[in-house]
Image (tube, helix red, strand yellow):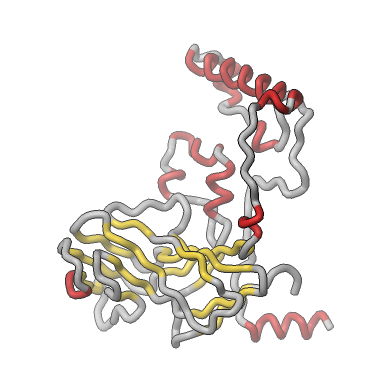
């Protein structure tokens, strides 16, 4: 097995399903001619992690007060409990229990958050960076109501998005504010792009047939600047598909076959 490790240690029987996140979103599907997918960074972000899926259909109601008793749960299925979701902190915060203890190698940590570009009216996910390289216990995934009311988490809906990042590398980053003219070649590339962008936008406004046929400028998609002088390296992606979680017994069987 190559690459950084992410061990998903089962903490409770029948934990929520853990899947590789997909790049699609319902609201992106609903845009005219699916134009939202022309923004490659959106779909790449959507698929850059793994999702924990809600095992039950449950409606959560907050009355606007701050105790743990001010949140109520109603499971919309018969003979099912809401053991993976609770009111632990009060203040309109809903807590999900992942059902796993995540472990990473030294130098890596887990970023737990809501799925990117997936909005939910009335409630918002809270982000957390967790030092999973040493932690022997789990974290919780929390959502906070934005106003009193009710929201429903559907069965199969992602309640937590898990991705990974280097633990401390960002602390060495020094942001530097510079005039663009400091780099003449870069500045020229930018001016060419800006000129072409303006011309393309004007063509769309005038219903120019050739411009409409192009639909959008594909420089980012193709990984090349308008002049062709700036080219993406081999890390350029137009689509991302992560490895699906696999049980350790399956992994051992695969490794045994390869031996």
Q: Nearer the viewer, residue 242 or 2?
A: 2
Taking the spot 27% from the left edge, 63% from the top edge, the residue there is 152
Q: Horizontally, is 104 left or right of 29 in the view?
A: right
Count of picture labels: 0
Q: Is residue 223 above or below residue 172?
A: above
Taking the spot 63% from the left edge, 49% from the top edge, the residue there is 239
Q: Is residue 23 above or below residue 202?
A: below
Q: Nearer the viewer, residue 206 or 174?
A: 174
Q: Is residue 4 above or below residue 174?
A: below
Q: Quadrant of the C terminus?
A: bottom right
Residue 247 drawn at (x, y percent): 61, 81
Q: Nearer the viewer, residue 148 or 218?
A: 148
Residue 10 drawn at (x, y percent): 51, 84
Q: Nearer the viewer, residue 61 or 221?
A: 61
Q: Quadrant of the N terminus?
A: bottom right
Residue 191 drawn at (x, y percent): 66, 20
For residue 99, what is the image quadrant?
bottom left
Q: Horizontally, is 30 left or right of 109 in the view?
A: left
Taking the spot 64% from the left edge, 83% from the top edge, the residue there is 248
Q: Is residue 35 above or below residue 53?
A: above
Residue 121 drawn at (x, y percent): 29, 52
Q: Horizontally, is 120 left or right of 139 in the view?
A: left
For residue 151, what is the image quadrant?
bottom left
For residue 127, what is the image quadrant?
bottom left
Taking the spot 59% from the left edge, 64% from the top edge, the residue there is 164
């Amino acid at each position: 097995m190559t690459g950084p490790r992410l061990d998903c240690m089962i903490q409770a029987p029948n934990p929520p399903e853990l899947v590789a996140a997909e790049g699609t979103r319902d609201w992106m599907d609903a845009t005219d001619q699916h134009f939202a997918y022309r923004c490659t960074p959106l779909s790449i972000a959507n698929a850059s992690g793994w999702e924990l899926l809600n095992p039950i259909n449950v409606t959560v109601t907050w009355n606007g007060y701050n105790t743990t008793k001010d949140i109520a749960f109603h499971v919309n299925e018969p003979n099912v409990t809401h053991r993976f979701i609770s009111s632990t902190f009060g203040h309109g915060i809903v807590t999900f229990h992942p059902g796993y203890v995540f472990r990473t190698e030294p130098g890596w940590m887990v970023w737990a958050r809501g799925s990117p570009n997936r909005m939910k009216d009335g409630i918002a996910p809270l982000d957390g960076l967790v030092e999973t390289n040493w932690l022997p216990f789990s974290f919780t995934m929390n959502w906070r109501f934005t106003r009193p009311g009710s929201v429903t988490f559907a069965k199969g809906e992602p309640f937590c998005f898990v991705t990974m990042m280097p633990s401390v590398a960002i602390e060495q980053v020094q942001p530097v504010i510079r005039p663009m003219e400091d780099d003449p070649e870069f500045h020229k590339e930018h001016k060419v792009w800006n000129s072409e962008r303006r011309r393309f936008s004007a063509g769309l406004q005038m219903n120019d047939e050739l411009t409409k046929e192009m639909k959008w400028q594909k420089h980012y998609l193709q990984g090349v600047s308008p002049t062709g002088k700036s080219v993406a390296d081999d890390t350029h992606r137009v689509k991302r598909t992560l490895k699906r979680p696999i049980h350790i017994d399956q992994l051992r069987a695969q490794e045994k076959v390869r031996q």
